[in-house]
Image: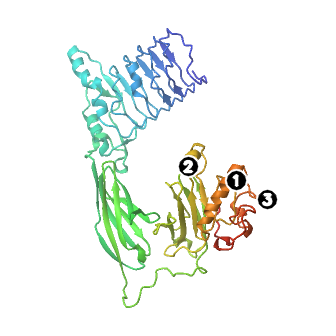
């Protein structure tokens, strides 16, 4: 009792029948921890820090009748471990963190007379757990035939039961439960959803589950140019569905979407589109999903002007490149699978300024367009392909990207090697004003540079790797802060081997066109 113990001792006498180890900070029950104590009948391991039970942790305990594991940190139990304890009658698992009870969890517990699963984290279980219990199937008949009065005590209270359609069978089972099974506390209470929280099982009526049904009250709407539009979608589902809005087959990010509960099964979702512009017209899709299936509804948005004799002005003044607010874009983070972009801008109205991200393969005729709402200045791109050239630009909404608002990068081909070493994805950011030796073998070029510059950067990088030379001439540390201080002399050259060539790729990096990487 109350002794710090890293593991269960190996030298336990083989003739022990009772073992009690409590408050000793045990963290696991290992394979065969008590296999040498074949006479063991009572095992108490309460109030430790046990998080793991090996599937063979009870090996050799054929005489065990009582196992108490109260007050530990178990999130799951290897229920097949009880094949080794055919005489087990008492199993106490209260005050743990169990959140799942498999359908055949009780298959090997046919001799139980007491099972305590109270004060855990169970929220959804099925009645099949108990109807598949051999004891439940045979005990009533055999005990009635033999004239016995023994009962099985079952404790399930103080769990966060989620009372939706998935719990229907279990709730009905609890209502009809009878001898030989007795509930220690028959007043089981719902913790959710919100409109059922605090209600007892006998106070609720649950319906069968159903796949979502999405419906748009208005499938076509016409809105004046520049006005706000609110799209409404009604979704009926059991259990509740997750709802997403899509436009041009892309999930909409940044718009204000709200949900409100209409009744137990119906939710209304509304999408607010502020200050409609010409490119906002088209088909919007409301998609609802739950574990049974999915459904969707389309809403078509049309625009009109009150004065058709005059051409419509653009919703936002199209500024010239010199007048447009400066946007500084950089790759802020890299992982094995993608990159995170960040940008900095000083618009006139930050709280109302939307941005547009243009992302895709460099040579793709059409880029993916994502609209980002006010107050957001980062975006993550994942699932990048190896050996692929990408371009990403950030601009004000309804403005085409201008010089300095794009980054072009090329992914490498050694992702698996870097993944094993927990290193960053191999990215070549094209800013090619000089050959840099930056962490993870990264080189940079402006979007004004030709792609043969990239190939040259790759060749030089590989040569530096072979020669063990990770610094450019002069020993300058490879970081993007040193990029802007560099002259034309280091542009895509291999020391003195190539004469300097004049051309587009020899331009100095202008302020804001360099990609800053940390």
Per the image, the residue denoted by label 3 is: 474
**Residue 327 higher or lower than 183, as above or below:** below
Residue 146 percent across, percent down from the top left: 22, 14
Q: Residues within 10 Å of mark 2 (few under 14, many from 20)?
A: some
**Secondary-structure class at tag 2:** helix
Left or right: 231 in relation to 67: left
The Cα–Cα distance between marks 2 and 1, rounded to whole angstroms, is 20 Å
Q: At 27% across and 39% down in the image, what residue appears?
A: 169
Per the image, the residue denoted by label 1 is: 464
Residue lying farthest bottom? 309
Residue 455 percent across, percent down from the top left: 61, 61
Per the image, the residue denoted by label 2 is: 415
Left or right: 472 in relation to 65: right
Left or right: 221 in relation to 57: left
**Residue 501 higher or lower than 458, as above or below:** below
- The residue closer to the viewer here, 373 or 431, is 431
- Residue 250 figure quarter: bottom left
Q: Which mark is residue 338?
A: none
Residue 348 percent across, percent down from the top left: 58, 76
Which mark is first along the chain, 3 or 1?
A: 1
**Secondary-structure class at tag 3:** loop
Q: At 44% across and 66% down in the image, what residue appears?
A: 255
**Residue 421 higher or lower than 227, as above or below:** above
Q: Is residue 375 visible?
A: no
- Residue 308 figure quarter: bottom left
């Amino acid at each position: 009792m109350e002794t710090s113990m890293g593991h269960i001792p190996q030298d336990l006498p083989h003739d022990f029948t009772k073992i009690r180890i409590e408050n000793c900070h045990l963290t696991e029950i290992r394979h065969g921890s008590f296999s040498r104590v074949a006479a063991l009948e009572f095992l108490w391991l309460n109030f430790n820090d046990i998080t793991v039970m090996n599937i063979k942790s009870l090996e050799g305990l054929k005489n065990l009748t009582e196992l108490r594991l109260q007050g530990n940190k178990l999130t799951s139990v290897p229920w097949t471990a009880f094949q080794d304890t055919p005489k087990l009658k008492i199993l106490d698992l209260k005050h743990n963190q169990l959140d799942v009870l498999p359908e055949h969890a009780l298959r090997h517990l046919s001799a139980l007379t007491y099972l305590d699963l109270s004060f855990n984290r169970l929220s959804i279980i099925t009645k099949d757990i108990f109807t598949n219990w051999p004891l439940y199937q045979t005990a009533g008949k055999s005990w009635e035939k033999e004239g016995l009065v023994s009962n099985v005590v079952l404790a399930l209270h103080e769990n966060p039961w989620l009372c939706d359609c998935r719990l229907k069978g279990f709730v009905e089972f609890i209502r009809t439960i009878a001898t030989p099974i007795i509930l220690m506390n028959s007043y089981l209470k719902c913790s959710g959803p919100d409109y059922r929280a605090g209600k007892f099982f006998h106070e609720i009526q649950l319906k069968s589950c159903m796949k979502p049904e999405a419906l748009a009250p208005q499938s076509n709407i016409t809105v004046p140019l520049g006005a706000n539009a609110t799209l409404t979608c009604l979704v009926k589902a059991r259990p509740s569905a997750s709802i997403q809005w899509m436009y041009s087959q892309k999930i909409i990010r940044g718009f204000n979407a709200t949900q409100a509960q209409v009744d137990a099964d119906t939710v209304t979702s509304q999408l607010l589109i502020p200050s409609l512009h010409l490119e906002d017209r088209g088909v919007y899709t409301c998609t609802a999903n739950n574990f049974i299936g999915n459904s969707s509804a389309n809403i078509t948005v049309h625009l009109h002007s009150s004065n058709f004799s005059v051409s419509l002005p653009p919703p936002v003044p199209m500024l010239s490149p010199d007048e447009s607010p400066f946007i500084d874009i950089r790759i802020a983070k890299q992982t094995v699978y993608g990159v995170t972009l960040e940008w900095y801008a000083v618009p006139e109205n930050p709280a109302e300024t939307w941005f547009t991200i243009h992302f895709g393969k460099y040579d793709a005729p059409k880029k993916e367009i994502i609209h980002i709402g006010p107050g957001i200045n980062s975006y993550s791109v994942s699932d990048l392909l190896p050996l692929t050239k990408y371009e990403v630009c950030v601009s004000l909404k309804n403005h085409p990207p201008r010089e300095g608002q794009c980054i072009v990068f090329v992914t490498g081909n050694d992702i698996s090697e870097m993944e094993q070493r927990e290193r960053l994805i191999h990215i070549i950011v094209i800013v090619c004003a000089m050959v840099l030796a930056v962490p993870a073998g990264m080189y940079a070029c402006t979007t004004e540079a030709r792609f043969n510059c990239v190939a040259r950067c790759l060749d030089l990088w590989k040569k530096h790797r072979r020669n063990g030379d990770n610094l450019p001439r002069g020993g300058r540390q490879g970081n993007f802060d040193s990029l802007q201080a560099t002259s034309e002399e280091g542009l895509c050259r291999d020391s003195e081997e190539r004469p300097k060539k004049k051309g587009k790729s020899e331009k100095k990096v202008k302020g804001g066109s360099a990609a800053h990487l940390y």
